[in-house]
Image (cartoon, rainbow, N blue to C red):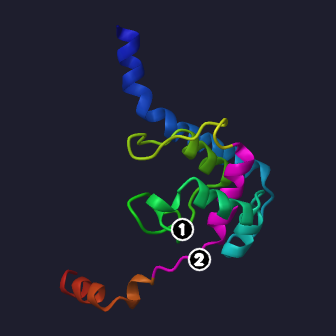
């Protein structure tokens, strides 16, 4: 019984650890490039964005994440914060499985997830800068 309770205690740490390891592995395998451009980052993906768009629609990713990847009830996908390996690990084992289904390699192969990732990386970030929102500026000026 002690072993089971220890597993439950450390289980929340397994996904962040897996993502951290995946990100470190991806970082170690990619050559150093300037990261100030989203286009430069998107070109480093290994997937096919047009096929990824088809899969994004086929598997109804838009239902929760929106067609723009940044609206809906699901997590915001744009701008993408994960490296490709971290994204794949997240989809395989989401932190809140009651909110997002996990997709096993039998359902979506790593190549297909790389394609979806490549598609997401092509989506523009359409959110306005915080400084351009008048009501936000008014609120912030009242609360120093």
Name the element at disc 2: loop
Quarter of the N terminus within the rendering: top left
Q: Quadrant of residue 37?
A: bottom right
Q: Is residue 114 above or below residue 97?
A: below
Q: Is residue 77 left or right of residue 136?
A: right
* Residue 124 position in % (x across, y down): 59, 77
Name the element at disc 1: loop
Question: Within the magenta stretch, is there residue 18?
Answer: no
Q: Residue at x 56, y 45 (%)?
A: 91
Q: Main secondary structure of the magenta part?
A: helix
Residue where numbered disc 2 is placed: 124
Q: Is residue 66 left or right of residue 118?
A: left
Q: Is residue 43 left or right of residue 71?
A: right
* Foreground pick, 45 / 129: 45
Q: Residue at x 55, y 45 (%)?
A: 90
* Foreground pick, 68 / 43: 68
* Residue 65 position in % (x across, y down): 47, 62
Residue occupying the far right of the picture: 31
Q: Residue at x 57, y 63 (%)?
A: 80
* Foreground pick, 42 / 6: 42
Total marks shown come to 2
Q: Is residue 125 above or below residue 44?
A: below
* Residue 106 position in % (x across, y down): 66, 35
* Residue 84 position in % (x across, y down): 67, 53
Dots 2 and 1: beta carbons under 8 Å? Answer: yes
The part of the chain drawn in magenta is: 109-127
Residue where numbered disc 1 is placed: 78
Q: Quadrant of residue 78?
A: bottom right
């Amino acid at each position: 019984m002690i072993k089971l309770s220890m597993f439950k205690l450390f289980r929340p740490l397994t996904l962040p650890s897996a993502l951290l390891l995946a990100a470190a592995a991806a970082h170690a395998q990619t050559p150093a490039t300037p990261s100030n451009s989203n286009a430069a980052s998107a070109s480093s993906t290994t997937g096919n964005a047009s096929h990824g768009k088809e899969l994004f629609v086929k598997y109804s990713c838009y239902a929760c994440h929106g067609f723009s990847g940044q609206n809906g009830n699901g997590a915001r996908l744009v701008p993408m914060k994960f490296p490709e390996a971290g994204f794949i690990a997240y989809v395989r084992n989401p932190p809140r499985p009651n909110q997002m289904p996990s997709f096993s390699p039998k359902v979506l192969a790593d190549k297909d997830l790389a394609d979806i990732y490549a598609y997401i990386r092509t989506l523009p970030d359409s959110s306005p800068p915080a400084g351009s929102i008048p009501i936000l500026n008014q609120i912030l000026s009242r609360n120093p």
